[in-house]
Each structure stands twice: as C-alpha cells, then as structure tokens.
Image: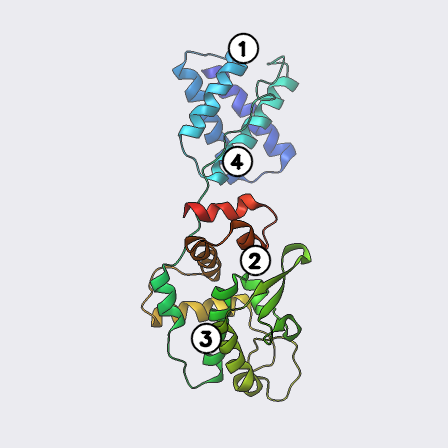
Amino acid sequence: MNGMNELIDRYLAELRVEGGLSNNTLDSYRRDLQKLQGFLASRQIQGPAGMTRHCMSEFLAYLKRANLSPASTARCMAALRGFFRFLCRERFLSENPLLSLSSPRPWVKLPKVLTQSEVAKLLELPDGAKPEDKRDAAMVELLYATGLRVSELVNLELSQLNLAVGYVLAFGKGAKQRVVPLGDLARRKVEAYLDSARSALVKGRSSRHVFVTRRGGNLTRQGFWKVLRARARRAGIFKPISPHMLRHSFATHLLDHGADLRSVQAMLGHARITTTQIYTHV
C-alpha cells in the first residue's frame, strides 16, 4: 500500500500549503484516511483503481457501524471528499465514487436531563434572607417552568412578562417571538422577587431587565451558571448540571405527562419538529 501512503502524503502536503489547516486538523485527516487505507488493505485493494462506488459504499457502512461521534463523522467525511477531489484532479481517478453516495448518519447524542425528584429538590430549596436568594429561586423556577434558553432568561425584560395573564414573551434564535405560558407557582416566585428583592438590588436605578445584580445590570449567563451549580450542590445534586439541562428536563417531563409534541415544539421555539422529537427518546 505504498502507493496509498504517497497519495495521502501528497494530498496533506497540498492542504498544508494551500489550505492553511492546523497541524492538529491535518493529523486528524491522516488518521481518517488511514481508516480508508486499512479498509482497502483488508480487501486486497492496492490503489485508486479499486476505489469503486460499491467499495466506498461498503466503507461508509463500515464507518456507520464504528459509531463515531457526530464531530468525528463530519470530519472524516470532509477528509474523504477532499481526498477524492484531489485524486480526480490529479487524474488518479476518472470519476468521484463518493458523488452519488449519502454520508452515514451519525448517532444522535441524547440530551441530559434531571429526574423529576432532582428537579423537586432544586425547586424546593428554602429561600435565604438575601435579595439574591429570591432572585435565584425565581430564575430557576422560571427556567424549568418555561423551558427558556439561558440567554433568553438572563436577558428577559419587564415588558416581556405578563403576570396578570400568566405568560412570558420570549425572543429566540433569529429574534423569533413566541408566547410561553407561566404556571401559578413560577408566577408567585417571580412576583415575590419583583415585590421586594429586585428593588433592593437596583436601589432606585433604572433597569429594564427582570433579573438584576447589585450593580443594576442583568445577571450574565456565566453568573447564572454558577448560581445553578451552587443551588444544585445545596440540594444534594452532585452530577454536572447546566441551565440547558433544565430546558431539556422541561421538555422531557412535559412529554412524559402526555403533552402534545407540537405544543412543546412551540414553547421551546424549535423550527423543526424533528428537533423536539429527540425528547421522546430520553
């Protein structure tokens, strides 16, 4: 298979000079192409002439069985496509055997969620005496009750809250607007925070944001991440936790209790129903 080694070396040398790729990426591409090289060797194929459409179809099936991560699958396909374009351009192949083949679909990583008992522990933590404690309790309750993204939560403005009717007006990706209903418990927690704690934090300063710090600005995503982890530890939850896990938990628990998939899609602000369907597999 010296011929294949030389072709891989020539292709990567071209990428190094013209593509400006990092050494790490080039090393990864080499490993990906060596997978192809080993596959061909196992079938006694000695050079480009044996890389037919049927052969490559079998190789893609082999990659699928290998259960590569989504990122590794995408990178491997990028290396293969570039390599075959190179072989065609240099006249080692008369046609590209990958052109009419579909890429293997990578396995989909299921979202991590909290159990309902873990969520209960998190939400039922006793409120502390500081204004921040009421703010933090309201934020966690609101996040689980609405499935907002953490960026939507920390940037939430007073004009987006309608506590009288019970809904939040959320602006998601691409500034798409959606109305998310708000349950009684979350509404009471937010009202309790707004009634006293928020004014103690802003101290007469003007702020359009719902959740603020003592400096008058809104809490950052990183700041809320720290708040959530600290509250999780207090609740006896020691596994890694993130704000997005509460969004995942919101969707999963709704579907567990018989919610309509389209309704959950609308509340999450997903453009495609297939994105929401992943929660049915959790």
Q: Is residue 60 above or below residue 266?
A: above
Q: Secondary structure at mark 4?
A: helix
Q: How many neighbours does mark 1 have within 10 angstroms: few (below 14), some (14-19), or many (20 or more)?
A: few
In the rendered image, residue 212, in percent from the top left (x then y), is placed at 57, 77
Q: Quadrant of residue 81?
A: top right
Q: Which badge, 4 or 2, is on the more N-terminal residue? A: 4
**Tag 4: residue type?**
Arg
Drawn side of residue 160 relative to residue 27, left or right: right
How far is mark 4 from mark 2, CA to CA? 33 Å
**Tag 1: residue type?**
Ala
Q: Secondary structure at mark 3?
A: helix
**Mark carried by residue 49:** 1
Q: Nearer the viewer, mark 4 or mark 2?
A: 2
**Tag 2: residue type?**
Met
Q: Which badge, 1 or 3, is on the more N-terminal residue? A: 1
In the rendered image, residue 167, in percent from the top left (x then y), is placed at 59, 68
Q: Which badge, 4 or 3, is on the more N-terminal residue? A: 4
Q: Nearer the viewer, residue 6 or 220?
A: 220
How far is mark 2 from mark 3, CA to CA? 22 Å
Q: How many neighbours does mark 4 have within 10 angstroms: few (below 14), some (14-19), or many (20 or more)?
A: some
Q: Which badge, 1 or 4, is on the more N-terminal residue? A: 1
**Mark carried by residue 267:** 2
Disc 3 target residue: 137
**Tag 3: residue type?**
Ala
In the rendered image, residue 257, in percent from the top left (x then y), is placed at 42, 56
How far is mark 4 from mark 3, CA to CA? 42 Å
Q: Do tag 1 and tag 3 residues touch (Cβ < 8 Å)?
A: no
Q: Nearer the viewer, mark 2 or mark 3?
A: 2
Q: Nearer the viewer, mark 2 or mark 1?
A: 2
Q: Do tag 1 and tag 4 residues touch (Cβ < 8 Å)?
A: no
Q: Nearer the viewer, residue 26 or 52?
A: 52
Residue located 48% across and 39% down the image: 70
